[in-house]
Image: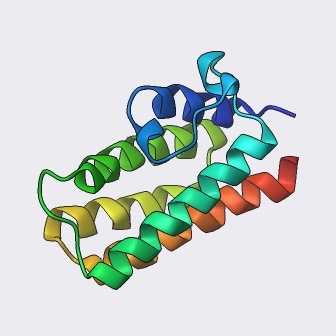
Amino acid sequence: MILRGLKALAVVVSIGFAGWVSQSPAYAWGELSCSDLNAAISDIDDISDEVFFEGGVRAGSSADGVLGHLIDVGRLLSELEDDGKLDRAVDRLEDAWIDEDWSGYSFALDDIADRLDYFYYRDC
């Protein structure tokens, strides 16, 4: 099953977030399968763990760029899914990113992963 919001995620993933997410034919077609969503959730968890254990992200690093893309993805998904919880988590992620608040970043990213988990369990 393919979600309307997950199609949007695939489009954004294909333009920049794909460096952290495994490439698959689904991205080329602008669709995201349940297995692709599961892989994205796992990758987001891995990124969160990496930042948590390293204590931050260097400005200009690839992880720094991924944060910006993740904010864009989250905004798009929250609008398409009309999901207030995801929207608030993205707001917190953006604030943490701007303030370089790595603890806040980690919690916000975990909340985003939780919302993606919710979409996965709801539709897959």
Q: Taking 120 as reference, is 108 left or right? A: left
Residue at x-position 58% and y-position 42%: 22
In which quadrant of the rendered image does the N terminus lie?
top right
- Can residue 85 be seen? no
Whether 35 is drawn above or below 48: the answer is above
User: Among all residues in the image, which is located at the extreme left?
Assistant: 59
Residue at x-position 29% and y-position 55%: 63
- Can residue 55 be seen? yes
**Colouring scheme applied when the structure was drawn:** rainbow
Q: Position of residue 37 (x, y in %)?
A: 69, 46
Number of callouts: 0
Residue at x-position 55% and y-position 46%: 78
43 and 78: which is toward the camera: 43
- Quarter location, residue 2: top right
69 and 39: which is toward the camera: 39
79 and 58: which is toward the camera: 58
89 and 6: which is toward the camera: 6
- Quarter location, residue 35: top right
Q: Position of residue 18 (x, y in %)?
A: 47, 37
Q: Position of residue 59 (x, y in %)?
A: 11, 58
Q: Position of residue 13 (x, y in %)?
A: 49, 34
